[in-house]
Every structure is written in C-alpha cells, then in structure tokens.
Image (cartoon, grey):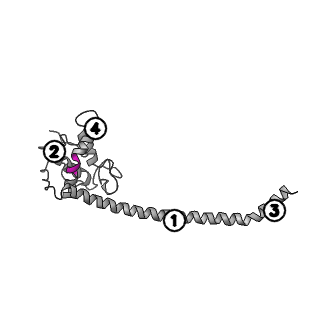
Amino acid sequence: MTTRARFSSPIGDPLDPAFADLLIAAAFGDTADRAPTEADWAYWRGVMPGLNARGLEIRYGGDDAAAGRRYAWDRLIGWQAGGADVPAFGPYANPPNGGPAAGWQTPLIDVAGSTPDPVPVPPPVDPPPLALVLARLVVIEAKQDQLALQIDRNTQELRDQINELADQARATFAAGLPTIRLLLEKVLMP
C-alpha cells in the first residue's frame, strides 16, 4: 500500500466518523506537528458534515464524489484560515513551507494499515459542540470589541488631523484675505 505525502489528503469518506477522525489527526500532524486537542476534535467533528456538503455543492476540485473530502481536507490544513488559525506548516502556512526545520515529531498518519503508529484515539466530545461554538463566539465578540476600540481611536485621530488641517486652511485664507481684497479692488476698480 502506498503512503500519502504530507499535506495530501488520505483517501476515504469524510462522513464515516472513523475516517473523519483520521483526516483530523492527519491534518493536525501535518500542519501543527501535534495531535489534536479535545477542542480541536469537538470543533472539526462538528463541522465535517457541513464541509463535505459544501465541497460537493461547489464541486470543489472536480465534479465527483471526492469533492467533499478535498474541500474538507483543504480547510483542515488551513486554506482560507486567518489569524491564529493559520497553520505553522504546509502550503497554507505563512510563509508556505514543507514542515519543521528540525524534522517531524509526529508520525505520518495515513489510511488504516499503513500508519507507522496507531492513530490517536480521540477523546469523547466534551464539551458538546454547542458549548464550543458559544466559547468561540465569546472569543469573536472580544476581538470585535478590540477592533471597535481601535476603529474609534483611529477615527478620533483622523478627526483631529482633519480639524487641524481645516484650522490651518482657515488661518492661511484669513491671512491672505486682505491681499486678495486689494487685488480685486485694483482689477475691478481701475
């Protein structure tokens, strides 16, 4: 049996819970050189059916049954990730790279039967996906609050700069007004 290359998807059905767990474990091994945390398991297990459906809907990478798996895999390895979710390693890392400079600490996870070490057994989903979603919402709201404060500060700085420029323009115009009046009088009343 051939072994997949790092960052290439194992082949299987992402709607099969055992294969979805293998995909998640492989993606974290490839992009973070670590096993998934309980929160990682809970989140990715919860979104896997939707990722598969979206890949099939948009015919991601081709019009076949594997479109869902390809889409789910690319999302797992960091495609369209931002901020803290950008992977450390792989084609979607910033900058893209082939892995840790000192070598891999985690084994390559492949299809059942060709994995050098057993695929780690994921813990039971705890907290439930709803609790995880709510926790992520709290983080997102905190980031929104930080962004709102930064926007307010930037807006106030821009207002201050505009007011300063307007004051300078008024002062310049006021200083030049007598000169303009004299020129107009000379031109209009010879």
* Mark 4 element type: helix
Say whether disc 2 or disc 4 marks the residue closer to the N-terminus.
2
**What is the distance, in whole Å, between disc 3 and disc 2 at their CAs?**
87 Å
Residue 91 lies, in percent from the top left, at 31, 47
Write down the region rendered in magenta: 44-48
Instruction: Please state the total of marks drawn on the protein image.
Output: 4
Residue at 17%, 48% in the rendered image: 21
* Mark 1 element type: helix
Residue at 74%, 64% in the rendered image: 176
Residue at label 1? 157
* Mark 3 element type: helix
**What is the distance, in whole Å, between disc 3 and disc 4 at their CAs?**
75 Å
Residue with the most extreme front position: 189
Per the image, is 83 magenta?
no
Q: Which mark is residue 182?
A: 3
The front one of 141 and 78 is 141
Say whether disc 1 or disc 4 marks the residue closer to the N-terminus.
4
**What is the distance, in whole Å, between disc 3 and disc 1 at their CAs?**
38 Å
Q: Quadrant of the C terminus?
A: bottom right
Identify the image quadrant of residue 136: bottom left
Residue at label 2? 19
Residue with the most extreme top position: 63
